[in-house]
Amino acid sequence: MPENENLLKKRIIELAERSYNNSQYLFTNFLSPAELSDCAEVLQKNRIRYQSFGGTEMAEREVIKFGSTEEFGYDMEYPISCIVVEPNLEKFAEELNHRDYLGSILNLGIERDVIGDIYIRGKTGYVICLSKMAEYIAENLVKIRHTYVKCRVADEMPKALEPEFENSIVSASSERCDIVLAKLYHISRTEALELFREKKVCVNGRVVESNSRNLKEGDVVSARGYGKFIYRGVLGVNKKEKLRVNIDRYV
């Protein structure tokens, strides 16, 4: 087991124990899908209850929360904020991508794990981050590539981040995850298999290394670099005796 993975699991157990012993809510920083999967494994093994959230339903990077209303008698919100990033002059603004936003933010001296997902809607960016860093980022992020920007911390999650879906009916020989992925994203089975080998596929927030896993109705699947979808199940069989599977893709 890699040393970094061991350290992460040790820190997670220590945080969970401190939350329980002190009867207080405690939160991690943002964790990647692979890190979330590692943490879920060790927490479930030790029968430790937890929750996780990344600010939106679409989030891949999430914060783990220790503590619950049942334990403490009150609730506490996740320390997550959203920064809205807009160009000063939209007609002169570049077409910026996720890497552009992230690079400019990290250049402020920000650690990667205080930043969650970054969404782009037109020429407006939405940066999910830990609340304690939101004002600092909003005040200091003034330029992304050659585009000057203005930032504000949203009072609540913007409606632009509410999930939208595009429905797809896919013809597949089975409900195996790799087969559905290949058909949905129009890639070869070999390319789909490589995603599993590189730990880029998550089902319900956990990394899945077995490409032969069958999907179940309601499973939320993400493939890094391709997107995220909800598996809605089998609608029937077509004339070629292939399954007609129903999928809602996040857009």
Image (tube, rainbow, N blue to C red):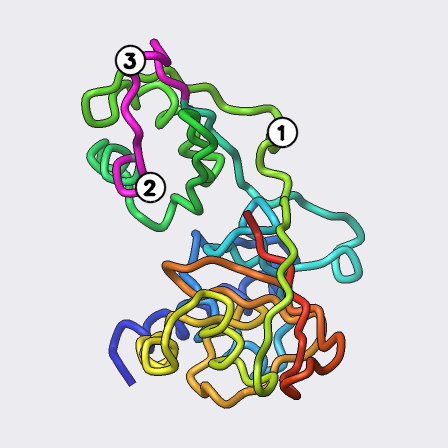
**Quarter in which the N terminus is drawn:** bottom left
Give the quadrant of residue 248. bottom right
Q: Which of marks 3 and 1 is in front?
A: 3
Give the Cα separation between the discs numbered 3 and 1: 28 Å
Q: Residue at x 33, y 41 (%)?
A: 98
Please give the range of residues in magenta.
86-100
Nearer-the-camera pick, 76 or 242:
242
In reply to whether residue 179 is colored magenta, the answer given is no
In this figure, which residue is indicated by the disc labeled 3? Answer: 92
Q: Residues within 10 Å of mark 3 (few under 14, many from 20)?
A: few
Can you see residue 13?
A: no
Instruction: Identify residue type, mark 2.
Output: His
Residue at horizontal 63 percent and vertical 49 percent from the top: 165
Rounded to the nearest angstrom, the CA distance separating label 3 from label 2 is 19 Å
Q: Where is residue 100 in the image (x, y as percent from the top left)?
A: 26, 36
Q: Where is residue 93 in the image (x, y as percent from the top left)?
A: 30, 18
Residue position marked by numbered label 2 in the rendering: 98
Left/right placement of residue 111 relative to residue 67 reads left
Residue at the spot of label 1: 156
Residue 15 visible within the image: yes
Q: How crowded is mark 1: few (under 14 residues within 10 Å), some or many (20 or more)?
A: few
Q: How crowded is mark 2: few (under 14 residues within 10 Å), some or many (20 or more)?
A: few
Closer to viewer: mark 1 or mark 2 = 2
